[in-house]
Image (cartoon, helix red, strand yellow):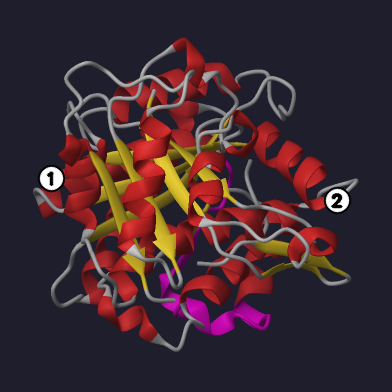
Amino acid sequence: MRGWKQDQRGLTRALPYSLHWTSQHRRSSYFYGSLKQKILSDQGKMERSNFSRLLLKGGWDPIFTCLDEIRTGPFSGLFHPDQIISGKEDAANNYARGHYTIGKELIDTVLDRIRKQNCMGLQGFLVFHSFGGGTGSGFSSLLMERLSVEYGKKSKLEFSIYPAPQVSTAVVEPYNSILTTHCTLEHSDCSFMVDNEAIYDICRRNLNVERPSYVNLNRLIAQIVSSITASLRFDGALNVDLTEFQTNLVPYPRIHFPLATYAPVISAEKAYHEPLSVQDITHMCFEPANQMVKCDPKRGKYMAVCLLYRGDVVPKDVNAAISSVKTRRGIQFVDWLVSHRVRFITASR
């Protein structure tokens, strides 16, 4: 597994890491480029997973600029031109416009493009969106409703940018978030949340980036997405498919909002001077400073935990680290948590 280091060009992969979850906006085209770097460039092994790729953007002038950059930029091969869909107007940060008016005009076109992908052995859908914007909240919820109708029980995993009070772009973000959460609650199998404030703080504190840009934020998110799908794309001691994430992390269908943490995230200056053991990395995963969402886990209990490791990791070391975590004061598990709810998964790269 690899973490992050900072150099003159931004962020690059460097170090071992682990990842765990507990139960408890819009971007520029840089995100899609970062995601391609992390997932598609890993020796071209994306073919091990079967996903439908579709890029949806709501908006006008600035959004078209982003789409043009995707079409003509260095990552133009990520999406087929016919799979890049945009509307003539944005949703104006209004959930109702994204769901009932503007979205309604586009939804049939979107579903038709998904069908044309003609995926063989489709595992499910990965939906990337924000909770705060009109398109991200309204249209995404409409799309997930229709996917449930068209594709039955295929898994639907969300990667959601959750609004943060300190980093807000619209006053109506809380309303949009509540509406989309209510609408997608029955249609999403697992939702990995990230908030901008937590990502900003990680870049400033751990990577010494004084003024983090969207490039920094998106590359960190892309690394997390790559980590989650690593067990699908690479051989390892325990490989999983999309449905197993739901089995391991979702104790009840409506409680499907795991908290992601990522460790270690350290700067280049510290990368080669701080050797970290499996136990060190595992303990770092339970530190609030490494969480992707601002919250205090000490005010609750862990209902399910899944640890993912990449690299040369021995199961014996992982089991010892998990035993050590269970004995730490301040980390509490629910009384009925049994051993199968604390899972670890390894990938070879």
Residue 37 is situated, as x and y percent measured from the top left of the image, at 57, 76
Q: Quadrant of residue 315?
A: bottom left
Q: Is residue 32 visible?
A: yes
Reading the image, the residue beneath label 2 is: 209
Relative image position of residue 241 (x, y in whole percent): 21, 61
SS at mark 1? helix
Which residue is denoted by mark 1 in the rendering?
149
Q: Quadrant of residue 327?
A: top left
In which quadrant of the rendered view does residue 102 lie? top left
Q: Where does residue 211 sit, x and y in percent of width and height?
A: 88, 46
Q: Nearer the viewer, residue 205 or 193?
A: 205
Instruction: Determine whether 134 is above or below 54 in the image.
Output: above
Q: Amino acid at mark 1?
A: Val
* Mark closer to the observer (1, 2): 2
Outermost residue to the bottom: 43
Magenta stretch, residue numbers: 71-90
Q: Residue furthest left?
A: 152
Neighbour tally class for label 1: few under 14, some 14-19, many 20 plus, Cα within 10 Å: few
- Numbered disc 2: secondary structure: loop
Residue type highlighted by circle 2 = Val
- Asked if one can make out residue 258 in the rendered structure from this viewpoint, the answer is no
Of 184 and 239, nearer the camera is: 239
> Real-space Cα distance between discs 1 and 2?
44 Å
User: Up-down: is 190 above or below 257?
Assistant: below
Q: Is residue 345 magenta?
A: no
